[in-house]
Image (cartoon, grey):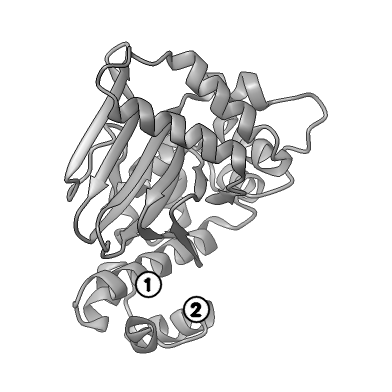
Amino acid sequence: MYTPFNSLSLSGQHTLKTWEQQGARWASYSLYRNQAAHELYIPQTILNLVIQGEKRMYDGRQVHCLCAGDVMVIPPGSLLCSEILQPKELYGSINLVIPDELLLTALKQPGRPVSATSRVLTTLTPDKRWQYFTAQLQRRFLDETLSSPDYYDIITAALQLISTEEAVSAMLAKAAADPLSAVMKQLSTEISGLRLMEEMAAMGHMSTATLKRRFRDVYHSSPMHWLQEKRLQTAGFLLRTTTAPISEIAYSIGFEDVTHFYRQFRRCFKVTPLQWRRM
C-alpha cells in the first residue's frame, strides 16, 4: 500500500522542518540517521533536492540512483518506491510541492510538444544554478533568524530552472493537465488485488476504451502493462528492503503464479529475483 506524500512527513525522519502556505505544507528539509524505505503516492508535482547521502527511487522498471547534488522532478499521480541507503553520517533532502495551477501557468506554452515524453521520474542536470538554488534553500531552513521565505518567489525560481529543460517541462505540464488522479488515488491502495482492466476503468469512472487512450497518451503504455511494471517495481523494492521469502513477495504484489513471476522479473530486470536481492 502506498502512503500519500502530502504532509511531507515520513517514517524514519530524524529531523523535519517545514514551511506552510495557507495552512498547507509546501516545503520540507528532512534528515535521516538510518536506512528507510517508503512506498509513496505523489498527488502533486514534487521537486526533490538531495543534500547529502544516497537513495534509490524505483519507477516501473527503472531504478534511479541519487546522491548529494542530484535534482529529481516527480510528476503528479506517481506511484513510486524510495529506498534511503544506510548513510555514513546523515541523509538529507529538500522537497518542494509545486501546485498544478502554477506549473501550468509557467510551463504550458503554445506549440510545445506536450506528448514528447511519458510521465516518469526525471533526474535533472545538477549544474551551478541548481547548486546555488539548493544552497540558498538549505541556508534558509537552517538559519532560524531569517524571516519566512516568500512562497511565490521560491516556486517561481524553481519553475524557471525547470523550464530550461524542454522535454521535462512538457512532461510536467501534460501530467498536471491530465493527472488521472481518481484512478491513481485508488490504485495506491488496491493495486495488488487488481485483476481486470474493467476494474481499473471503474476507478476513474470511465470506459475501458477511454482508459486505454488516456494511458497511451500519458504513460505511452497500456493500462495492464503499466500495472505489471508497477508490480515488478514493488518486487524489486521489497527484495532489497525486506527479508521476506520471494514467493511471499510475489503473492503480496498480485502474482498468482510464482513461476510466472520469476519469468516476468527476469524479462524486466535481466536477472533472477535472488540475484537481484544479492546485488
Q: Position of residue 255 (x, y in %)?
A: 34, 73
Residue type indicated by callout 1: Gly
Contact between labelled residues 1 and 2, with CB atoms less than 8 Å apart:
yes
Residue at 57% x, 33% y is 178
124, above or below 21, in the image: below
Given residues 234 and 145, the one toward you in this image is 145
In this rendering, would 79 be left or right of 122? left
Along the horizontal axis of the image, is 5 left or right of 162?
left
Q: Would you call the spot at circle 2 few (<14 residues within 10 Å), some (14-19), or many (20 or more)?
A: some
How far is the residue under mark 2 from the one under mark 1? 9 Å
Q: Is 60 situated left or right of 238 in this image?
A: right
Residue under pointer 1: 236
Q: Find residue 172 and report its horizontal and vertical position in percent.
A: 60, 37
Q: Nearer the viewer, residue 41 or 227?
A: 41
Mark 2 lies on residue: 269
Label 1 CA crowd tier, 10 Å (few <14, some 14–19, many 20+): many
* Mark 2, secondary structure of its residue: helix
Residue 248, quarter of picture: bottom left
Instruction: Measuring from the top left, give residue 260's x and y in whole percent.
Output: 41, 84
* Residue in the foreground of this view, choosing between 215 and 73: 73
Residue 162, horizontal then vertical, whole percent: 62, 35
SS class, disc 1:
helix
Instruction: Say which quarter of the image contains residue 143.
Output: top left
Q: Residue furthest right?
A: 111
- Does label 2 or label 1 sit earlier along the sequence? 1
Specify whether 195 is left or right of 61: left
Question: Quick check: 59 above or below 25?
Answer: below
Question: Can you say whether 200 is above or below 64 in the image?
Answer: above
Instruction: Report the number of numbered marks.
Output: 2
Q: Give the amino acid at mark 2.
A: Phe
